[in-house]
Image (cartoon, rainbow, N blue to C red):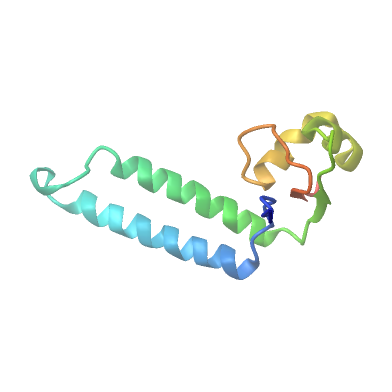
Amino acid sequence: MATTSTAKTAPTPAQRQDVISALQAVITAAQAEMALPATTRAVAASDRDIITTAQAEILRQQLALSQPSAATYRVRAGDTLFGIAQDQLGDRLLYRLIQQANGMSWLALTPGQTLVLPKS
């Protein structure tokens, strides 16, 4: 039985630019929707949330593009974000930077997963 890898790899600069462009299109569409009279809008309440979320993601992508290439770390069995942060960044409490750099909202790791290590 063939297995597939679920490890995430860091997006390339070109992929990040594509994400930024797509998000800018989402913002433009949401702003156009907001400009319509309230009676003709399909989704009025969530337009601001869509714009805010898209703008936050654009900033995250631009920040990643502006940083020099970060080091990567391949997760091994038994690794934890706390341990990786301590060993690689010098402080176990910097695990949140690893989470942010990899778009993670959880602590679970998969052996073989590649993590981007931010500059501490």
**In terms of depth relative to the viewer, which is nearer, 84 or 40?**
84
**In terms of depth relative to the viewer, which is nearer, 77 or 87?**
77
Residue 23 placement: quadrant? bottom left
42 to 45, vertically: above or below: below
Extreme residue toward the left, this view: 39
Residue 48 placement: quadrant? top left
Residue 30 spot, x, y in % from top left: 29, 52
Q: Name which residue lies at 86% across and 41% down.
A: 89
Q: Name which residue lies at 63% across and 54% down.
A: 63
Numbered circles on residues, count: 0
Extreme residue toward the front, this view: 1
120 to 22, vertically: above or below: above
82 to 17, vertically: above or below: above
Image-based side of 64 in relation to 79, left or right: left
Image-based side of 37 in relation to 18, left or right: left
Residue 92 spot, x, y in % from top left: 83, 30
86 to 39, vertically: above or below: above
The quarter of the rendered structure image containing the C terminus is top right
Residue 87 placement: quadrant? top right
Q: Name which residue lies at 25% across and 37% down.
A: 45
Residue 85 spot, x, y in % from top left: 83, 37
Residue 74 spot, x, y in % from top left: 82, 49
Extreme residue toward the bottom, this view: 14
Q: Name which residue lies at 55% across and 66% down.
A: 17
Image-based side of 19 in relation to 35, left or right: right
